[in-house]
């Protein structure tokens, strides 16, 4: 019998990818399935970005690049941080990676020793705890509530920090809740973090541009500039510019930490794809105008979906501020059906309603379901009609 590492046995495959695969298998069997599991925009990558990549291929820009990214892409990232976020970085504080996922992976491996604790508010992006575990760190989950808008309170954060805490993870707008922290809310969390000078902060700003809350985007460094020295900002082009397949993410932070992450990357993937880096540069230098119609479409779908979910029996959903997910509670509907396990419930909805949703337990919040609205309004209406029928019978 083949023996595998303890490390790999501690982690699970990405549940969101698993739901997408399960839906694909059922479809191949001829079943009519609406997939609301995917975590990627349904829009095409904007034309000017694709053109830049095609030009790069034709110009022969198809070789290794610097491990940490091309100088011109790093410059575009530095300008982006300055213009959009009012944050200043030098080139040695920037690392370009193969997606936001690799950025966090590099961070975990470069920062954590066995037993180091990482504070992660739930519901969380599915990959944080598993990547921490791969690095032999210990995820410390802070459970937020729907009543508190799925946001971590200052008291919760304070209680979660111990002498072993190495990192606190913030993600706003959030996958899966869609909620974003306002500047004032971040100041309150920042006041707690100021008490613990040895704790680092990772702010995952991947959904920065997909935001319609009236308070606008801020991260923890905007709220508490004194945290600049120990905050790592994670961002990328995947969600904002509909570029999930190009695999470009980037990180900015203390030069020493960025250098360590670069060392990890140099011994795993080396540089991200040369062609994709040119595309990402075109995206960042091309301005955010092309994102606006996508955000408008996401908002329209959000408004429809949240209202429609709340009209379903036993379902409750709060409004999101951004991203492209609704995260309703199905606890009452599950209780009515006598189901306590949300994975079983999601499977039942997949078979009986033909609607694929990701169970909340994947995000640390059992009893909820994540529905992606990165799909047409028509498809969403069809999904709601099917769920209504399955829940009412
Ligand atoms: N961070 C969050 C919160 C996400 O939802 C995702 C993607 O699902 C990522 C990071 C990683 O994105 P990618 O690796 O596709 O750039």
Image (spheres, rainbow, N blue to C red):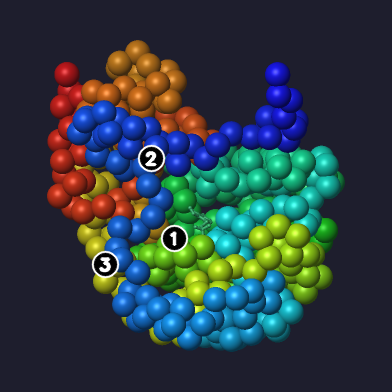
Q: Secondary structure at mark 1?
A: helix
Would you say 261 lies left or right of 185 here? right
Q: Secondary structure at mark 2?
A: helix
Residue 211 image point, x, y percent: 39, 65
Per the image, the residue denoted by label 2 is: 20
Residue at 56%, 69% (x, y): give it: 273
Instruction: Tell me, yes or no, if residue 234 can be seen here.
Output: no
Per the image, the residue denoted by label 3 is: 296
Q: Against 198, is 63 above or below?
A: below
Mark-to-mark CA distance, 1 and 3: 22 Å
Residue at 15%, 27% (x, y): give it: 389
Residue 9 image point, x, y percent: 68, 30
Do callouts 3 and 2 mark residues in contact (Cβ within 8 Å)? no
Dot 1 surroundings within 10 Å: few (below 14), some, or many (20 or more)? few
Q: Which corner quadrant of the image does residue 224 belong to?
A: bottom right
Dot 2 surroundings within 10 Å: few (below 14), some, or many (20 or more)? some
The N terminus is located in which quarter? top right
Residue at 51%, 82% (x, y): give it: 60
Mark-to-mark CA distance, 3 and 2: 25 Å
Q: Against 311, is 223 above or below?
A: below
Residue 289 image point, x, y percent: 34, 80
Residue 168 image point, x, y percent: 68, 53
Per the image, the residue denoted by label 1 is: 245
The C terminus is located in which quarter? top left
| Along the viewing direction, whichever of 66 and 60 lies nearer the viewer | 60
Q: Against 10, is 123 above or below?
A: below
Do callouts 1 and 3 mark residues in contact (Cβ within 8 Å)? no
């Amino acid at each position: 019998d083949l023996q595998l590492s303890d490390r790999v046995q501690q982690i699970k495959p990405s549940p969101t990818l698993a739901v997408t695969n399960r839906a694909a298998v059922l479809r191949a069997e001829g079943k009519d399935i609406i997939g609301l599991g995917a975590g990627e925009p349904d829009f095409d990558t904007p034309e000017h970005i694709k053109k830049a990549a095609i030009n790069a291929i034709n110009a022969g820009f198809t070789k290794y690049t610097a491990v940490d990214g091309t100088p011109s892409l790093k410059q575009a990232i530095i300008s982006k941080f300055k213009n959009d976020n009012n944050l200043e970085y030098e080139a040695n504080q920037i690392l370009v990676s193969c997606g936001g996922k690799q950025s966090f992976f590099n961070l975990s491996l470069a920062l954590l020793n066995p037993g180091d604790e990482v504070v992660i508010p739930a519901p969380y992006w599915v990959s944080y705890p598993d990547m921490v575990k791969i690095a032999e760190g210990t995820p410390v989950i802070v459970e937020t509530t729907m009543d508190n808008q799925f946001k971590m309170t200052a008291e919760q954060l304070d209680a979660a920090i111990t002498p072993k805490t190495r990192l606190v993870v913030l993600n706003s707008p959030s996958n899966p809740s869609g909620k974003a922290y306002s500047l004032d809310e971040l100041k309150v969390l920042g006041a707690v973090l100021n008490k613990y000078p040895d704790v680092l902060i990772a702010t995952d700003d991947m959904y920065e541009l997909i935001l319609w809350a009236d308070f606008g985007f801020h991260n923890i460094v905007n709220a508490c500039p004194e945290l600049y020295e120990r905050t790592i900002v994670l961002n990328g082009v995947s969600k904002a510019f509909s570029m999930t397949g190009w695999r470009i993410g980037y990180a900015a932070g203390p030069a020493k930490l960025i250098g360590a992450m670069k060392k990890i990357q140099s011994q795993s993937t080396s540089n991200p794809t040369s062609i994709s880096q040119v595309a990402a540069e075109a995206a960042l230098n091309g301005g955010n105008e092309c994102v606006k119609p996508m955000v408008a479409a996401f908002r329209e779908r959000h408004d429809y979906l949240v209202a429609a979910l709340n009209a379903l029996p036993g379902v409750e959903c709060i409004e999101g501020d951004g991203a492209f997910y609704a995260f309703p509670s199905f606890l009452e509907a599950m209780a009515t059906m006598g189901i306590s396990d949300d994975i079983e419930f999601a499977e039942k909805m997949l078979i009986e309603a033909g609607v694929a949703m990701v169970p909340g337990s994947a995000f640390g919040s059992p009893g909820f379901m994540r529905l992606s609205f990165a799909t047409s309004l028509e498809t969403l209406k069809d999904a709601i009609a099917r769920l209504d029928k399955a829940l009412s019978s």
